[in-house]
Amino acid sequence: MIGAATVRLTRVGLEAFDYPLQVHHWAFLVVFLLFMLISEGYRGFQKSFAPRVASRARELQLDPRALPALLAPLFCMGFIYATRSRMLRSYGLAGMIVIFVLIVRRLPQPWHALVDLGVAAGLLWGVLAVIAFTYRVFGGPVDTESGD
């Protein structure tokens, strides 16, 4: 899901370069890219979301109950079968994301595209973080030649 959103936002974001960007557009892009890489990519994904998703995926592998397995993405993201606090934070964050998407859609170009580039950069970091943590939690490559 995150990968598809990253591709979609990157496509929209690249439309920014169809417009004659001025200095203030470039300044905004640089500052917003850095902000999104630090806040969304590093702090949001690498430090919080990715380790939790990988850990809950491992938990599901070790204790594969039917309903959580059927709803694995929701389980791994903390929307179901989590503490009340975790579920409130997960649903609250999802709600905030929906509100931000609705606001950004109303921005004129090239601002909309510039924001999407920043978000796509943060999401790309997030995809890589989820892959890295999942790889780490599941123990890396499987040795198929040892017979184990």
Image (cartoon, grey):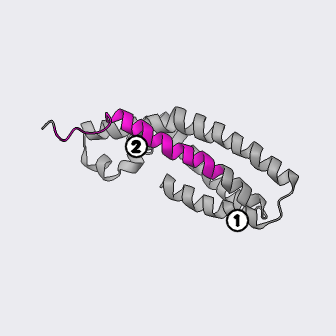
Camera sees residue 96: no
Amino acid carrying label 2: it is: Cys
Between 8 and 76, the one lying in front of the other is 8
Asked whether 139 falls inside the magenta stretch, the response is yes
Q: What separation in Å lies between label 1 and label 2 (alpha carbons)? A: 33 Å
Judge the density around disc 2: few (<14), some (14-19), many (≥20) Cα neighbours within 10 Å. many
Q: Earlier in the sequence, mark 1 or mark 2?
A: 1
So how many labels did they put on this image?
2
Residue at 74%, 62% in the rendered image: 16
Q: Which of marks 1 and 2 is in front?
A: 1
Circle 2 sits on which residue? Answer: 76
* 17 up-or-down from 40: above or below: below
Rendering coords of residue 40 (x, y %) = 61, 41
Q: Quadrant of residue 78?
A: top left
- Residue at image coords 59%, 40%: 41
Horizontal arrangement in the rendering, residue 12 relative to residue 73 (left or right): right
Neighbour tally class for label 1: few under 14, some 14-19, many 20 plus, Cα within 10 Å: some
First to last magenta residue range:
119-145
Residue assigned mark 1: 15
Q: Where is residue 139 in the image (x, y as percent from the top left)?
A: 31, 33
